[in-house]
Image (tube, rainbow, N blue to C red):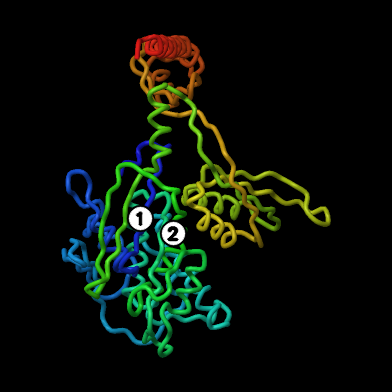
Amino acid sequence: MSTANSSARTVGVVDPFGGLAGDMFLGALLDLRDGEGQAMVEPQWLRGQLASLDLPDWQLEVEATSRRHLGCTKATFVVPDEEGHRHLPEIRARIEASALSPRAKAMADRSFCVLAEAEAAVHRIPVERVHFHEVGAADAILDICGVSAALDRLGVDELVCGALPGGSGTIRCAHGDMPAPAPAVVELLTDFVVQPGVGEGEMVTPTGAALLRAWGRPLRAGELAGTRALAGYGAGTRSSSIVRVSLMEPRAAAHANASQSQAGSDLLRDEVLVLETHLDDETPERLAWLSERLFELGAVDVAYAPLTMKKGRPGVALTALVPPSRREAAIACILRESAALGVRERVSARTVLARHSETVATPFGPVSIKRAGERYKIEHEDLARIARARGLSLQAVRDVLRGYIAAEIVAKVLGKQQAKAKAEGSPG
């Protein structure tokens, strides 16, 4: 789906009617096709991304198949047999050292962190003592990193999930027989709708639940109507195992975009999550690093302000504006990369001027500007190029160009107003 319009959002909708596992999730993403029938996530590109995890002798097999008489894609990682366990620090270090995008890294890391927290909760041990069995194997690491890389490449802003089948009976795992769903899965899906007894055996795996917890939230009844829906189907090992992932633009956003386009409005309305915390004992280098990581995760703005803390000590107030869909990753980043022990949060509505770039004809030739409403800024590179070529000062070039550019913007604004008045006066 197109992500060119910054005001449009792409929502991924998971429909786990036949269960959910990491390989099924990945298969559904690889199954997605654009309007011309081309894969939206190319397997060869994904192989290149995952090669940077430096896991030994693995292969990704992608097969067109069917489940429940529906065409779908089966994604399978073939890995050598392994002995021993992997611990969380090793997996996190491997992800951090990879060539995945910053957002894909953050979300894959988040997936393993929430999984470790769930395992620690059910075994009643500290997180640092958790060691992974099945989910620490190479194929599970590849599943989680593969799904994170694919979701990022697809430009998914938010992931929502409908009711999940709880399964029935017992599951054979490293700790012996466990009830379905597994205890860690129950912990991970605390906020999601799970239907006990629906499906036979294990219907949701820990890798599937961890990805859902890190990336998604429950779908609320009646909240989502969308346009331009694209659907992919991913197959599991069993003949009944299948999941659907759809991409759509929420209808409200689509209508708002259309209305703004038709009316020529320069105002865009949306919501941001405001995250705040007070920090002390931080160096400028660490604060700059934190800002950089938050921007990599998609933060709209990051600001620091001086303040006085307990005992008269100087500190800084951090305020970060992030899209609501980046909440989990942004909070985890702040707590991981700073001395903060907590983060305050609130959702805030905002109205912003639409911003875009355009080229204006001038006596010095075409000049690029960035424009928001009737305000504009001339690109410095064009100013410098003209000043060098004409032997003029930068300020002199700016002063001359301002008159021409202002006149052109006024003409465009008046033209829009006249077109609008003419359209409103036309008979319906």
The residue drawn where x is 40% and y is 66% is: 164
The residue drawn where x is 59% and y is 46% is: 347
Nearest the viewer among 380 and 68 is 68
Q: Which residue is mark 2?
A: 215
Nearest the viewer among 396 and 75 is 75
The residue drawn where x is 41% and y is 59% is: 161
Picture quarter with the N terminus: top left
Can residue 236 be seen in the rendering of this structure?
Answer: yes
Q: Is residue 135 above or below residue 368?
A: below
**Amino acid at the residue labelled 2:** Trp
Judging from the image, what secondary structure is the residue with disc 2 in?
A: helix
Give the quadrant of residue 226: top left
Judging from the image, what secondary structure is the residue with disc 1 in?
A: helix
Residue reaching furthest to the bottom: 176
Give the quadrant of residue 212: bottom left
Q: Position of residue 85 (x, y in %)?
A: 41, 83
**Amino acid at the residue labelled 1:** Leu
Q: Is residue 33 above or below residue 85?
A: above
Specify the label residue 399 is tagged with: none
Locate residue 190 relative to residue 341 in the image: left or right.
left
Locate residue 383 relative to residue 55 in the image: left or right.
right
Q: Which residue is mark 1?
A: 151
Q: Position of residue 251 (x, y in %)?
A: 39, 40
Q: Position of residue 426 (x, y in %)?
A: 36, 10
Mark 1 nearby-residue class (10 Å; few <14, some 14–19, many ≥20)? many
Can residue 408 be seen in the rendering of this structure?
Answer: no
Sequence order check: which comes first, mark 1 or mark 2?
Answer: 1
Q: Is residue 100 above or below residue 120?
A: above
User: Tags 1 and 2 in contact by the CB under 8 Å rule?
Assistant: yes
